[in-house]
Image: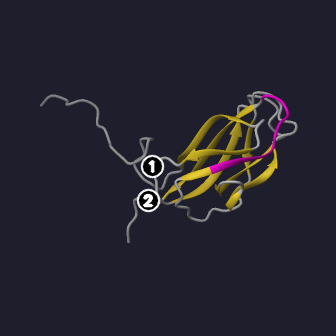
Amino acid sequence: MANPGPASTQTIHPQGLLSNQAIRLLAVFPAVNVNVLGDTVLPIANTTNYSIYQVIFTNASTSLTTAAAGLFTSPSAGGTAIVANAALSALTGPTVVSQRTVATTANQAGQNLYLNVATAQGAAATMDVYVYGYDFSTYSQ
């Protein structure tokens, strides 16, 4: 019998995971403008029930000496604070990775998260945002 080729697996995740018990990328937004006050919407990818494990800010276009931001479940820093508004001064350039303190790991169901810039940088500046967590959406009891 001839080899039919490599095996493939289809899942609900954009990543090729074999289990929903793995930590995976839930949301990403490259080049968030941190020189404008307000919200940037981060759509949640392919899940309806999740717990956030880690939030990473990285790839700052310049040293973020003034800007402050946080991640929330509702617009205008409303709902649950996933990451409280705090200074981004640890982001001094594009190679720095800042793992933010996650304030809650409670199950979430909202399909958007909101990165709220509470204090603008004062000059052109961007950063990338990555949200990782557990996906519980395929479990039914």
Amino acid type of the residue that numbered disc 2 sits on in the rendered structure: Ser
Q: Residues within 10 Å of mark 2 (few under 14, many from 20)?
A: some
- Which label was assigned to residue 46? 1
Q: In the image, residue 76 lies at what x, y percent?
A: 71, 54
Q: CA distance from mark 1 to mark 2?
A: 9 Å
Choose top left, top right, bottom left or bottom right for residue 3: top left
Residue 116 magenta-highlighted: yes
Label 1 sits on what residue type? Asn
Earlier sequence position, callout 1 versus callout 2: 1
Q: Does dot 2 land on a helix, a strand or a loop?
A: loop
Q: Secondary structure at mark 1?
A: loop
For residue 110, above or below residue 57: below
- 4 relative position to 75: left or right: left
The x, y position of residue 95, in whole percent, is: 74, 29
What segment is highlighted magenta in the picture?
A: 114-124
On whether residue 126 falls in the magenta region, the answer is no
Residue in front for this viewpoint, 23 or 136: 136
**Measured from the top left, where is residue 20 in percent x and y?**
44, 54
Q: Is residue 14 above or below residue 110?
A: above
Q: Quadrant of residue 63?
A: top right
The residue that appears at 59% across and 45% down in the rendered structure is 42
Give the image location of residue 67, x and y in percent.
82, 40
Which residue occupies 56% across, 45% down?
27
Which one is in front, 34 or 141?
Answer: 34
Pointer 1 and pointer 2: residues touching (CB < 8 Å)? yes
Residue plotted at (85% across, 34% down): 122
Residue on which disc 2 sits: 137
Asked whether, in this view, residue 69 is left or right of residue 82, the answer is: right
